Each structure stands twice: as structure tokens, then as C-alpha cells.
Image (cartoon, rainbow, N blue to C red):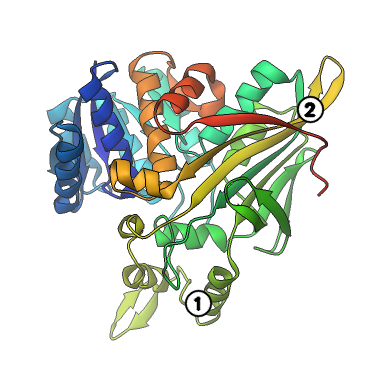
Amino acid sequence: MGKILVIGAGGVSSVAVHKMAQVIAAGDGPFSEVLLASRTVSKCETIADSVKQRTGVDIRTAQIDADDVPALTALIEQEKPDLVVNLALPYQDLPIMDACLATRTDYLDTANYEPRDEAKFEYKWQWDYQDRFKDAGIMALLGSGFDPGVTSIFTCWLKKHHFDRIDTLDILDCNGGDHGQHFATNFNPEINIREVTANSRHWENGDWVEGPPLTQKQEFDFEAVGPKNMYLMYHEEIESLKTHLPEIQRIRFWMTFGDAYLTHLEVLQNVGMTRIDPVMYEGREIIPLQFLKAVLPEPASLGETTKGNTNIGVIATGVKDGVEKTLYVKNICSHEAAFEETGNQGVSYTTGVPAMIGAAMMLSSQWKGHGVFNMEQFDPDPFMEMLNQHGLPWKLEELEAPLAF
């Protein structure tokens, strides 16, 4: 049984803490206590109240600035958690990892570090902690969300059970939900817009292929959603998958966007509202994208109005016993069901549940090691089993042919 310190109080954190509390209430898992900490303690208290109402489990709360390494270190030393689950902003990954190093405490997150002043998504900064975490005798698990996270688990599960070799991999992320807003993002607006407006990049034949953002489009018919336009993007699991599964010749990531979203985004870019460099306003510097975040709907507020489904999965083409085949493994998640269970919409749910499962893998020692690890470096089977048990059931189908694009 283990004590968890969860840092961050957004929608993903809310889902993860609700799911941890469900496991505690059932008495059949590795969690014994959860402490939820964030800069705004009132958000933690709101989540704790919901958890108490829904599960009967008490969640303690605390105030913490995740950028303040000494304060983080002091909190960890005081509370002595068995695992720190970082569900704060990607900018804060390194300070939290530093505090874990200082206290020799295991670490988990759902998204790779990125600097505040540059929209650059890569694992280099966190992989550089490998020797320090190994020497300290502790473990860091990176990217235990859905994508990254479950998509890597899907991939290595396919490799383990259905392929001798995977040649091509396509990750397809479709949010078919409708929240009724003119323009809103389903997770942190600042992170979402930085990601969407970055250049596309995919891995092919041993090298990166880069292009302008949102210029390569394909239509795909998603089960439980329907036909949607999806766009080629860069996503961090491409980097880890090509590193740990170097046999894969091509890895691409696709995400769906509606025309209205893209029109609004284009206008915001054209008028400078997506800039991440400071501008002077009334005698002080502001970051336009951070101001935009402040005026957009809070993603955690969208749960009650969001209807429809998400559909996220991977399509792999490869060889088994000398025969080429194409397999598609995916999850379909209902926004309405996610809200009924946890008070959050499906995008938060699909990230928060894998965060809980990754924590369970570590606390139960089903996944263990010293150093910094990505999801695909561990046995996928117990994780896949817990997905079915905790609200993200998956399905496998064989396609008639590889993708035509």
C-alpha cells in the first residue's frame, strides 16, 4: 500500500484522484492515501469534496508552487509519499523531478517537459536525468497519459502478441465531442495551442520529416464518431517509440480538428494572440498566449456540456510468421459517461485514468527499475488489463489493407 502526492488540480488531476479513491474504496489496490497539492488550494478542495461525495474517501490537500524546488522538497520530506504524480504543467516537470531527486522519491508524469519560452517538445531534458535517478535508486515514469502513454502501450502490446516486426505505425486521436462553445480547448489552452501550431514532424526511414503545421490532411471514418478530418502533427511519443522500437520505419501522429476550431485559431495567430514572447501592455510585459488562456473557457468547466465520444488508437502494419497484416487497437470513451463518473469530460478522463494505472504499476512493483523510463519499456499486459477494469476498454480489429495514405 502506498501514499501518493498528486501535484496539479486541473481536469486530469481530478480524474486521476477520483480513480485512485475508487481503488482505495474498493480495498483491492496499491493506494493507501492521496495528498493533492496545487498553487490554488481551493481547486484541490473542490476536487476533494467531489471525491468524498462520490467515493466516501477523504483526500487531504495542500498549497504548493510547483516551480519552487525548495518548497516542493520540504513538502515531500514532510509527507514522505511513496510516489509523486506530476499532473501540473509540462514547464514544471524539471522542478518536480529535482525535488524527487533531492528526497529520493519515485516520479510519474503524463507529458514531456517543454521550456516556457520555446514551443519545443522533446525528451532530451528528462532523459538527461537517467544517471542521477539511477544513482539515487529511484524511478521516473514519463508520459503515463493516453497519448503519450496508452498509445505506446497499445504499440508494444501489438508487438508482443501479434507481430514479429512492426513496419509502420499511425497514431490516430479523434475527439468527436461537442462542448457548445465557439472556441475552447479540451485541455490547458496554452499547452494545446503551442502544440497545434508547432511544425508537423514524423519519423520515416531513420530520419525526421518536417513540414508546416496543419497542412497535411486526411479524412478517416472513426467508429462512434463518423468521418473526420485529421491532420499530421508532431507528438512526443514518436520520439520515444522510434528510440525504443527502432525497427519501425515510419511513425506518424494524426489529430482531428473541426473547421470552426481551425478558423478561430488562424485568426488568433494572425492577430498575434498565440505568441509566446512577451509584449509591453500598459507599462508591463505580458505573454499574449497566457492572456488568451485567461479569457478562454477553463477546460475543467466543459464537462457538463460536452457530448459525444473520443476515439484514440494505433494502426500498425507489420509481419507475423512471414505474413503482412494491419491491426487497429483503439479505445472509445463517452464524454457523458466520464462526466457522470468523475465530473470531468472525456479528454481529461482518457489522460487521468492512465495516470492512475501507471501509478498502480509502480506501487505494486509490476513495473520497477532505477532511472528514467518511457511506457513502452515495460510489460504492457497488466496495464492493458487495468484499462479494461477502470473505464477505458479497448478493442482490436484487423484491417483489410494498410492505410492508403
Amino acid residing under circle 1: Leu
Q: Which disc is residue 80 wearing?
A: none
From where the camera sits, is residue 138 visible?
no
Q: Using residue 339 as the reference point, say whether residue 231 is left or right of it.
A: right
Q: What is the quadrant of residue 163 in the picture?
A: top right
Q: What is the quadrant of residue 331 in the picture?
A: top right
Between 123 and 158, the one lying in front of the other is 158
Q: How far from the left and from the top, in percent, is residue 198?
A: 59, 60
Q: How far from the left and from the top, in percent, is residue 72?
A: 21, 39
Q: Which residue is mark 2?
A: 318
Amino acid residing under circle 2: Gly
Which residue is pictured at 15% across the width and 40% down the height?
Answer: 53
Q: Secondary structure at mark 1?
A: helix
Using a 10 Å C-alpha cutoff, classify the residue at mark 2 as few (fewer than 14 neighbours), some (14 to 19) or many (20 or more). many
Sooner in the amino-acid sequence: mark 1 or mark 2: 1
Q: Secondary structure at mark 2?
A: strand
Using a 10 Å C-alpha cutoff, classify the residue at mark 1 as few (fewer than 14 neighbours), some (14 to 19) or many (20 or more). some
Between 355 and 369, the one lying in front of the other is 355
In the rendered image, the residue lying farthest to the right is: 322
C-alpha separation, residue under disc 1 versus residue under disc 2: 41 Å
Q: How far from the left and from the top, in percent, is residue 216?
A: 73, 60
Q: Using residue 201 as the reference point, say whether residue 308 is left or right of it.
A: left
Q: Which residue is mark 1?
A: 268
Q: Is residue 134 above or below residue 79?
A: above
From where the camera sits, is residue 266 visible?
yes
Which residue is pictured at 42% across the width and 18% down the height?
Answer: 370
Q: Using residue 68 as the reference point, say whether residue 108 is left or right of it.
A: right
